[in-house]
Image (cartoon, rainbow, N blue to C red):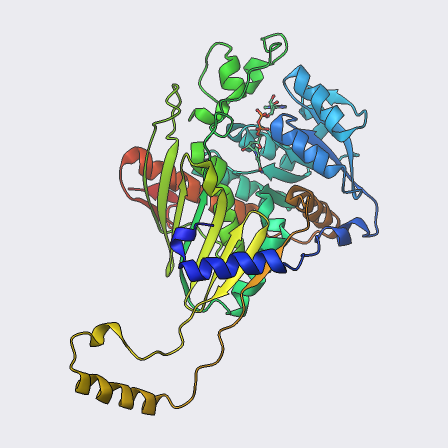
Amino acid sequence: MNPTRLSRREFVRISASAALSTPLLQPNWLAAQSAPGRPVRFVSIGTGIRGCDLLRAARQVPQGVLVGTADLYDMHLKAGVEAYGKEVPTTRDYRSLLGRKDVDAVIVAVADFQHRRVVLDCLDAGKDVYCEKPMSHNVADGLAMVKAVAENKRIFQAGSQRVSNVVYRKAAEIYASGKLGDVHYIEGHTDRNSPSGAWVYPIALDASPETIDWATWLRDAPERPFSAERFFRWRCFADYGEGVAGDLFVHLLSGIQHVTGINAAPGRALSSGSLTHFNDGRDFPDLLATLYDYPSLTVNLHCNQNNAAGDSTIIYGSLATLIIQNNTLTVTPQDTRPESDVYSLNGWTLAAKQQYLKEWHAAHPVPPPKLGEVEAYSAPAGYDDSVAHIATFFRAVETRQRVVEDEVFGNNAAIACHMANHSYFQRAIATWDSATQTIKS
Ligand SMILES: NC(=O)c1ccc[n+]([C@@H]2O[C@H](COP(=O)([O-])OP(=O)(O)OC[C@H]3O[C@@H](n4cnc5c(N)ncnc54)[C@H](O)[C@@H]3O)[C@@H](O)[C@H]2O)c1
């Protein structure tokens, strides 16, 4: 939350209310746990940072049972087994897992530029897919995945876990109720000021061409000699990732799409930014701000080097302001009750002022209603929306019902990320041409 955006009075009301009584929202994956039916048998492709996180989350959802993992790096294979806490077959060649008839679904947590190939292979093998965000490395990859999901009639979920977060679901409910009034402006930011936040991840001591299958890792990117730096810090390089937009904006955009119900690429995007602090040979800016045009909605996102601001989405409505910060949301009614003017009467004579006030009060005989209370909601302490998102996926595999963050939703959020980068690098406004399904400037 950025107090400078709110009046001091509003900020104090929000803080006091959130501190005093914040109803806890019930985690929404509990229902999935008790659902009848046989478990979903899944494998995991990519058991690095995120893949291990997802396996730790998945072991809390008994509806799914891990039956194998694949990775190209020996230590990540071992870490995946540790994360899930159960011995399962592991392999460097994921295709051997896809040939198994006892596998229903696949969690894909490989680097962004590898999503397309792995996801298409999974779909061709008849598996349902959970694919990490951002869904695509470029527009063509995303469109190919959307087509393949439809052709194979599979369940697909993209991996921005806030779409299954109870706080965002509550926000979507409040938004749909009309309580916020007209909304034409949304602001979101995820700010980071640390080497880890800027993807300067440590390089494991055992990293070498013997422990990592570099040729396979690199197969959809330009040829280069083995580089442990690129393997561990791929987010910094345009051949493999999409920088701040693909790593962080995608979560903000997915949350905003979910809350507002928008499921389309933005019409236009305009980015500003620079590479200042972490100027270490990377391709992407470390500061990025992007303005998006959606139909009658402006969305303003940024990522800067300031840890204090954290991760927030602020929805400005004509009747109320909704703020989501981490796992808490507040709704603050806006005071739009009629008031007689004061400021503009400064240049009036006393007699004119008195006449105006007399007429104003005659026109407003009824005292305005009391201003509504600030509402605040939180997820319970320790709530992990990745568990909720995995549970959403497993439930969909069982019920064959589409999820909210399906391939079309995931693709639209990813296109918005590509538009942010297009605008930054081309120094031009990026426009989404829906007829040709391309970004133009
Ligand atoms: N939802 C989130 O909050 C979140 C958080 C972090 C990362 N992510 C996403 O998760 C994905 C993975 O990111 P990460 O940080 O775990 O990266 P990582 O580099 O730590 O792990 C990726 C793993 O994929 C493996 N891999 C690549 N190609 C493979 C192949 N053909 N077969 C088998 N394994 C293969 C690599 O060996 C590596 O171990 C990315 O798309 C990233 O954007 C999402």
Q: Quadrant of residue 360?
A: bottom left
Residue at point 29% right, 35% down? 426
344 versus 390 height, above or below: below
Observer-nearest residue: 85 or 419? 85
Residue 60 in view (yes/no): yes
Residue at point 48% right, 25% down? 195
Where residue 211 sits: x, y (%)?
A: 63, 11
Where residue 117 sits: x, y (%)?
A: 56, 29
Quadrant holding the C terminus: top left
Observer-nearest residue: 298 or 189? 189
Observer-nearest residue: 168 or 400? 168
Where residue 396 sits: x, y (%)?
A: 70, 49
Where residue 40 sits: x, y (%)?
A: 77, 41
* Residue at far front of view: 350
Q: Quadrant of ligand 1?
A: top right
Residue 129 as seen in the image, left or right of residue 199: right
41 versus 352 height, above or below: above
Residue 249 as seen in the image, left or right of residue 87: left
Residue at point 60% right, 30% down? 118
Residue 100 in view (yes/no): no
